[in-house]
Amino acid sequence: MSRSREEVEATLQIAKLNVEDLRSTVQCLTFSETFTSGDYSLMELDDALCKEVEAGGSLVIRGDKMDHAVLCSQNKTYDLKIADTSNLLLFIPDGKTPELLPADQPPLSIIPCEIAGFSNHYWELRRRRPKLKKLKKLLLENPYEGPENEKDTSASVYMTEDLLNQIQASKEELMEHLKVLHACNVKGFWRLLDFDYEMKLLNHITQLMDSESWSFSRVPLRVCLEELRPLEPEEMIEHCLECFGKRFSEEGETFFALDEDKICRATAQMLLQNAVKFNLSEFQEVWQQSVPEGMTTRLDQLRGLALVDRTSRPETIFLLKTEDLPEDTQERFNTLFSMREKWTEADISPYIQDLCREKQTIGALLTKYARSSLQNGIKVFNSRRPII
């Protein structure tokens, strides 16, 4: 039932409001006959998400039954949290914001609007890191060891859509992490290369470089494929070059500039993966001898891959990969402090850097989850809570 002009004027008089101070159009609210409180949910979107939806993009809620649901855009992941409000939020499909109201209406022009529902809470979005640890676990169910070892046709394999249905990440974040893992698309399915097989491919390439006296900054793709075709599939050789180098063209021919740090890092992992601890000085000597001629090994190439123990005599080094640590921030700190009671910022930074949210620094993260003290004049960090 819509209000009359007289009723609106009487209401304004009771409220002690002047008609001249208000907009000319009045929206009178009434409850719909199908009014309900359970058929609608509200979600608060930031400007970037609003523009993405208005441009035709989609938002997807992802998560298994035991997961806390996340919402994903094309390139970002958000936590979904219910926020209560003391104000009643009304759903008015025909309601108009001030800029949509006609400006040339006579005073007290009445527009009826129906309230379709209400809510006292809404979904609040908070940007978060994608949950990608499960991705490697899925791909390790059936690692790719080369065409000659492909026997079990019933083993688990995943297409992009399969992974999106199980991994709590946006499509862009998922595809980027597949690159980080050196995953390869084999016959439409994403496969994680077995590390030994990957090193076998890399070894073929570096041996060819040595025999042809090529600079590692200029490896010709065509010749590389022709020479190594009898040993491995061309797509695997090219994939290995993509993983450890950067493609460029010169005079119509494709070349790769191999990344010294990536190759040195992979070689170190190969040497360390079967040892509990390695004498540091001996490791550095063997490591330098194992990389291609012209490359120089440095300990800073192993950030987030291996940890040096300077307190042991002799000093040692052992494999500790960031990707193998818990995704949850508190669990990550608990794990690190259970391994070592006190950490320098230089040692712990590579293992917590990926935990930092947008605009959050490592220093801020350490302030929240650790205590600092001086040990022999050096600032160290230990846990804020007892480690069980």
Image (tube, helix red, strand yellow):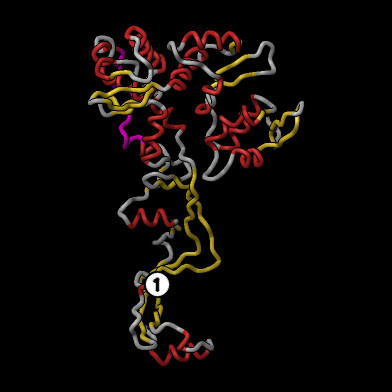
Residue drawn at (67%, 11%) of the image: 314
Residue drawn at 32 percent across, 9 percent down: 212
Specify whether residue 300 is in view. Answer: yes
Residue 161, percent from left and from top: 31, 37
Q: Considering depth in this image, is 337 or 232 the residue closer to the camera?
A: 232
Report which quarter residue 182 is drawn in.
Answer: top left
Q: Main secondary structure of the magenta part?
A: loop
* Segment tinted magenta in the rendering: 149-163
Q: Residue at 75% of width from left, 31% of height from top?
A: 374
Q: The disc labelled 1 sits on which kind of residue?
A: Thr
Hey, which residue is sitting farthest front in the picture?
251
Residue that carries the numbered disc 1 in the rendered image: 97
Q: Could one spot residue 33 in this view of the protein? A: no
* Residue 228 is a magenta residue: no
The N terminus: image quadrant = bottom left
Return the residue nearer the eye: 235 or 32.
235
Which secondary structure, mark 1? loop
Q: Quadrant of residue 139?
A: top left
Residue neighbourhood size for the residue with mark 1, other residues' Cα within 10 Å, grouped as few (<14), some (14–19), many (≥20): few
Q: Report the number of numbered marks.
A: 1
Q: Position of residue 312 (x, y in %)?
A: 68, 15
Residue 348 x/y as whole percent:
61, 29
Tell me the quarter of the image containing the C terminus: top right
